[in-house]
Image (cartoon, rainbow, N blue to C red):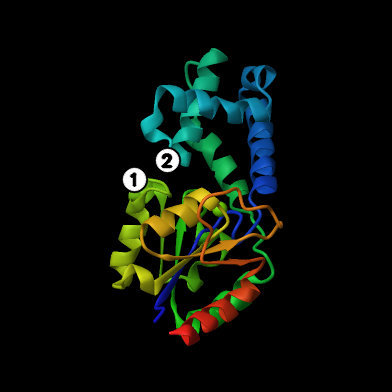
Amino acid sequence: MIKAITFDLDDTLWDIWPVVERAEERLHDWLKVRYPRITDRFTPLELRELSQEVIAVWPEIAYDRTRLRKEALWLAAQRADYGEFDVDSAFAVFFVARNAVEPFADVRPALERLGRRYTLASLSNGNADLRLIGLHDLFKFSLNAIDVGAAKPEPLMFDLARQRLAAQPEQIVHVGDDPEHDVLGAARAGFRTIWINRTRRDWPGGSRADAEIASLIELEQVLTDWEREK
Ligand SMILES: [Mg+2]
């Protein structure tokens, strides 16, 4: 008996990379006016890449994308010789633009239908704000790596979800696009797994998900088939 479905967010419910690139450009435009030595020195992509330098010296904050962005911005300000830097305002510019995502057309209809039969929750490694995006009403609760203190595929987020759902792991289905974070992580936690592969990628190897779908429209059928099997 399946009781609940947990969903990844970025690249599962919307395309994230075009939105991140746009958000990085917005941030760069904002910096250009207020801190021009930063933008003289760093392109938007180079600013993003500073996160890798932060992770190299500070791997324990890698799960926290907000902190990581802020530390990378601090590093940029430092290298551009700004002793004072309004990191919160800079991050806010990025964050608003980062949440200007366009959910795929199948998301709301599919989740509204599924929500009548199952409890729905979201499990994300990113810092999306479902209220800003306008999908918060679809989920009973939402967990992200920042609140939990660990990112998928580590088991903590899955374990906390299972506790909140008051369900056995095999009664929960996790749906996500990332073979490692979502499929491997959820399988290790004992969840049933569904790989959503919207762009027809090849499976990278390792144990496959229990099912694969190209859109959320197919999800209800997969679950119905599973319920029938038993
Ligand atoms: Mg994803």
Image position of 87 with respect to 172: above or below: above
Q: Which residue is mark 2?
A: 63
**Quadrant of the snapshot with the C terminus:** bottom left
Is any atom of residue 85 visible in this view? no
Q: Amino acid at mark 1?
A: Gly
Taking 102 as reference, is 92 left or right?
Answer: left
SS at badge 1: loop
Does 87 appear above or below 187? above
For label 1, count other residues whose C-alpha is less than 10 Å away and answer few (under 14), some (14-19) or many (20+): few
Quadrant into which the N terminus falls: bottom left
* Residue found farthest to the bottom: 228
Marks 1 and 2 sit apart, C-alpha to C-alpha, by 7 Å
Task: Give residue 149's mark.
Answer: 1
Mark drawn on residue 189? none
Residue 177 found in image quarter: bottom right
- Can see residue 112? yes
From the viewer's perspective, is 208 left or right of 1?
right
- Image point (63%, 50%), residue name: 16
Q: What amino acid is at disc 2?
A: Tyr
- Answer with mark 1 or mark 2, whichever residue precedes in sequence: 2
Q: Quadrant of residue 58?
A: top left
Q: Nearer the viewer, residue 22 or 14?
A: 14
In x, y percent, where is residue 84?
A: 47, 20
